[in-house]
Protein backbone atom coordinates (compact mmCIF):
# COMPACT_ATOMS: atom_id res chain seq x y z
CA UNK A 1 0.00 0.00 0.00
CA UNK A 2 1.05 3.64 -0.46
CA UNK A 3 1.58 4.39 3.24
CA UNK A 4 3.92 1.40 3.62
CA UNK A 5 5.82 2.28 0.44
CA UNK A 6 6.30 5.85 1.65
CA UNK A 7 7.44 4.68 5.09
CA UNK A 8 10.07 2.45 3.46
CA UNK A 9 11.20 5.04 0.89
CA UNK A 10 14.42 6.92 1.58
CA UNK A 11 14.64 10.70 1.37
CA UNK A 12 14.40 11.85 -2.26
CA UNK A 13 12.91 8.58 -3.51
CA UNK A 14 10.20 8.15 -6.12
CA UNK A 15 7.31 5.86 -5.23
CA UNK A 16 5.60 4.50 -8.35
CA UNK A 17 1.87 3.82 -8.36
CA UNK A 18 0.35 1.42 -10.86
CA UNK A 19 -2.64 2.22 -13.03
CA UNK A 20 -5.99 2.00 -11.33
CA UNK A 21 -7.83 3.37 -8.33
CA UNK A 22 -5.96 3.17 -5.03
CA UNK A 23 -8.54 3.40 -2.24
CA UNK A 24 -7.05 4.79 0.96
CA UNK A 25 -8.35 3.59 4.33
CA UNK A 26 -6.73 6.56 6.09
CA UNK A 27 -4.95 9.81 5.22
CA UNK A 28 -1.46 9.19 3.83
CA UNK A 29 1.05 11.37 5.70
CA UNK A 30 4.20 12.52 3.92
CA UNK A 31 6.98 13.83 6.17
CA UNK A 32 10.06 13.72 3.91
CA UNK A 33 11.13 14.77 0.43
CA UNK A 34 9.58 12.22 -1.90
CA UNK A 35 7.83 11.97 -5.26
CA UNK A 36 4.68 9.91 -5.78
CA UNK A 37 4.38 9.15 -9.50
CA UNK A 38 1.37 7.55 -11.14
CA UNK A 39 0.83 6.35 -14.70
CA UNK A 40 -0.99 9.59 -15.61
CA UNK A 41 -3.90 11.53 -14.15
CA UNK A 42 -6.42 9.64 -16.30
CA UNK A 43 -4.82 6.31 -15.33
CA UNK A 44 -4.01 6.54 -11.61
CA UNK A 45 -6.33 7.80 -8.85
CA UNK A 46 -5.88 8.12 -5.10
CA UNK A 47 -9.34 7.80 -3.59
CA UNK A 48 -9.23 9.41 -0.14
CA UNK A 49 -10.91 8.08 2.98
CA UNK A 50 -14.43 9.33 3.71
CA UNK A 51 -14.44 12.72 5.42
CA UNK A 52 -10.65 13.06 5.60
CA UNK A 53 -7.84 14.35 3.38
CA UNK A 54 -6.31 11.80 1.03
CA UNK A 55 -2.79 13.15 1.49
CA UNK A 56 -1.23 15.38 4.15
CA UNK A 57 2.25 16.88 3.92
CA UNK A 58 3.85 18.04 7.16
CA UNK A 59 7.40 19.07 8.00
CA UNK A 60 9.12 18.29 11.27
CA UNK A 61 9.50 21.26 13.59
CA UNK A 62 12.07 23.64 12.15
CA UNK A 63 12.34 21.65 8.92
CA UNK A 64 10.78 21.53 5.50
CA UNK A 65 9.35 18.93 3.17
CA UNK A 66 9.14 18.97 -0.63
CA UNK A 67 6.60 16.38 -1.73
CA UNK A 68 5.66 15.98 -5.39
CA UNK A 69 2.59 14.20 -6.73
CA UNK A 70 2.85 13.59 -10.47
CA UNK A 71 0.63 11.69 -12.87
CA UNK A 72 -2.02 11.13 -10.19
CA UNK A 73 -5.58 12.32 -9.65
CA UNK A 74 -6.44 12.79 -5.96
CA UNK A 75 -10.12 12.42 -5.13
CA UNK A 76 -11.81 13.30 -1.82
CA UNK A 77 -14.97 11.59 -0.58
CA UNK A 78 -17.60 13.06 1.71
CA UNK A 79 -18.28 11.16 4.91
Image (cartoon, rainbow, N blue to C red):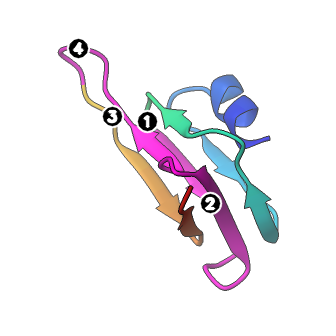
For the N terminus, give its image quadrant: top right
> How far across and how far down the image is residue 46, in percent?
65, 61
Discs 3, 1 touching: Cβ within 8 Å: yes
**Which residue in the protein does label 2 denote?**
37
In this view, the residue farthest toward the bottom is 42
Residue drawn 56% across and 68% down? 75
Q: Viewer-nearest of labels 4 and 2?
A: 4
Residue 38 appears in the rendering: no
Alpha carbon distance from label 2 to label 1: 13 Å
Decide: few, some or many residues near mark 2? Use Cα within 10 Å; few <14, some 14-19, many ≥20.
some
Decide: few, some or many residues near mark 3? Use Cα within 10 Å; few <14, some 14-19, many ≥20.
some
Alpha carbon distance from label 1 to label 4: 15 Å
Alpha carbon distance from label 4 to label 2: 27 Å
> How far across and how far down the image is residue 52, in percent?
50, 47
SS for tag 3?
loop
Discs 4, 2 touching: Cβ within 8 Å: no
Is residue 60 inside the magenta stretch? yes
Q: Viewer-nearest of labels 1 and 4?
A: 4
**Which residue in the protein does label 4 denote?**
61
Residue drawn 56% across and 40% down? 27
Residue drawn 31% across and 26% down? 59
Judged left or right of residue 44, residue 68 is left
Discs 3, 2 touching: Cβ within 8 Å: no
Residue drawn 51% across and 34% down? 29
Nearer-N-terminus badge (3/2)? 2
Nearer-N-terminus badge (1/4)? 1
**Which residue in the protein does label 1 denote?**
33
Nearer-N-terminus badge (4/2)? 2
Alpha carbon distance from label 4 to label 3: 11 Å
**Which residue in the protein does label 3 denote?**
65
> How far across and how far down the image is residue 49, in percent?
63, 50
Amino acid sequence: DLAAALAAAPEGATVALSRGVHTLAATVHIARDVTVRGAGPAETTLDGPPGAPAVAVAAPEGGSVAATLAGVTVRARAS
